[in-house]
Amino acid sequence: MLQPNKLKASLAAGSEVFGLINSLPLPLMTEMIGYAGFDFVILDLEHVGVNPQTLENMIRAAECAGTTVLVRVPRAAPDIILRVLDAGAQGIVVPHVRSRDEAELAVASAYYHPRGTRGIAGGRTTGFGTLSLPAYFERANRELMVVAMIEDQEGVEAIEGIVSVPGIDMVLEGAIDLSQSLGVPADAQHPSVQAAIARISQACRSGGVPFCAIPRAPGQCERWREQGVQAFLLGDDRATAFRAMKQVLASYRD
């Protein structure tokens, strides 16, 4: 059954939150991320092939560990968003949002009337009928999150319109894809990329929408904090595990 969204509550309270992308399609990894203390986990359907049953079990694992579970869908597709939320996700992350229209489509696909047009179903989201449909609609429209990822020059240019869409609960930068869109592939620290991210962050502040930063260089997290940023995505499980394994091995070899 859909639970209160701790991430959404923490953002509203002004608390600092940290998340991790879960790229390995393993419920055990999802559970581990939660018990490690991350405030939220993003299950990845954009770059990773995950079958529906595994996705549902990963969502269960996040629920078990008490962390907010979001799912990055491949695009703002109503049918995909519907299935992800019916599986129990507490929100969606939509990549490559380039316009206000795309943001509005994502919101409409995620919420019920009067906020959106999401199709109606029961199942595990209602505790198999423990929660009535009207009560679930109210809870879903209150607790679910829609996160827009800005990864293209078009999205940067449209950012003021995107953050003005009611129902966009957070904006996440995607500097690596953004670098390609700006003609400097894989250079996330390029001045043009950093200027674009600064514009995204400023638009979020002006629009009252939380901005989620991805610290990639020493001192970046501290600079974001000074600007009032409270949400941070700390990479993904593969890179985190790989660095930890190398560190352990090096400590013995040295």
Image (tube, helix red, strand yellow):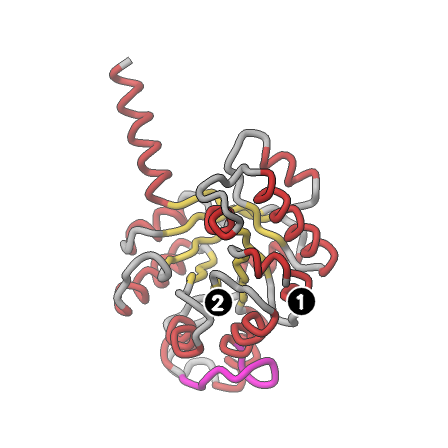
Q: CA distance from mark 2 to mark 1?
A: 31 Å
- Which stretch appears magenta? 111-121
Q: In the shown orientation, is residue 116 left or right of residue 61?
A: right
Q: In the shown orientation, is residue 215 left or right of residue 45?
A: right
The mark tally for this picture is 2
Which mark is on residue 50? none
Q: Residue at x 57, y 61 (%)?
A: 154
Q: Secondary structure at mark 1?
A: helix
- Marked residue nearer the N-terminal end (2 or 1): 2
Q: Position of residue 59 (x, y in %)?
A: 36, 62
Which mark is on residue 161? 1
Amino acid type, label 2: Gln
> What residue is disc 2 on?
3
Q: Position of residue 240 (x, y in %)?
A: 37, 38
Is 61 part of what is drawn in magenta?
A: no
- Mark 1 nearby-residue class (10 Å; few <14, some 14–19, many ≥20): some
Quick one: 157 or 183, which is closer to the camera? 183
Q: In the shown orientation, is residue 149 left or right of residue 250?
A: right
Q: Quadrant of the C terminus?
A: top left
Q: Residue at x 63, y 63 (%)?
A: 158
Q: Position of residue 203 (x, y in %)?
A: 69, 56
Q: Residue at x 50, y 37 (%)?
A: 216
- Mark 2 nearby-residue class (10 Å; few <14, some 14–19, many ≥20): some
Q: Residue at x 61, y 70 (%)?
A: 100
Observer-side mark, 2 or 1, equals 1
